[in-house]
Amino acid sequence: MRSKSLFAAALGGWLAVSVLVGCDGGSSPAARQYPLHGEVVEVSGGQLKIDHEAIPGYMGAMQMTFPVSQPVLLQGLQAGDHVHGQLSVTGGQPIVTELSKD
Ligand SMILES: [Cu+2]
């Protein structure tokens, strides 16, 4: 009966791995959260162009444009403002969900 329990253990391990992989590549992946720091380059069209610092685990420092979850986040911001906030990435699509001046 030793081989039978070994098989059960192997099957259990395989199931556990399948579930983990499934979580990572499903059709509705969980949003990943990253801290965002940088300097506003431009605010236009409801989007934020920012010269951001490196985002560990996501991307290096660069200048780029992000959409924001609510237009109110951009209120009162102008080029040159130093800001920090939160970036939520779902299925490779980033969106700024929190933003305030430093
Ligand atoms: Cu970037």
Image (cartoon, grey):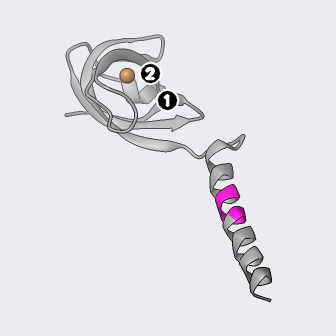
Instruction: Describe residue 88's horizontal placement relative to residue 23 as left or right.
Output: left
Q: Which residue is mark 1?
A: 94
Tell whether circle 1 marks a residue whose Cβ is less than 8 angstroms from ligand 1. yes
- Quadrant position of the C terminus in the picture: top left
Mark 1 falls on what kind of element? strand
The magenta span reads 14-18
Seen at 70% across and 76% down, the residue is 9
Measured as percent of width and height from the top left, residue 62 is found at 30, 18
Question: Up-down: is 63 above or below 73?
Answer: above
Q: Main secondary structure of the magenta part?
A: helix
Mark 2 falls on what kind of element? strand
Which amino acid type corresponds to the residue marked 2 in the rendered image? Phe
- Quadrant position of the N terminus in the picture: bottom right
Instruction: Describe residue 27's horizontal placement relative to residue 93 as left or right.
Output: right
Question: Up-down: is 39 above or below 95?
Answer: above
Q: CA distance from mark 1 to mark 2?
A: 7 Å
Measured as percent of width and height from the top left, residue 25 is found at 65, 42
Seen at 51% across and 36% down, the residue is 89
Instruction: Describe residue 43's horizontal placement relative to residue 52 as left or right.
Output: right
Q: Quadrant of residue 39?
A: top left
Q: Using the image, tell me which numbered label, if any, was put on residue 66.
A: 2
Q: Do the numbered discs 1 and 2 sit on residues whose CB atoms are within 8 Å?
A: yes
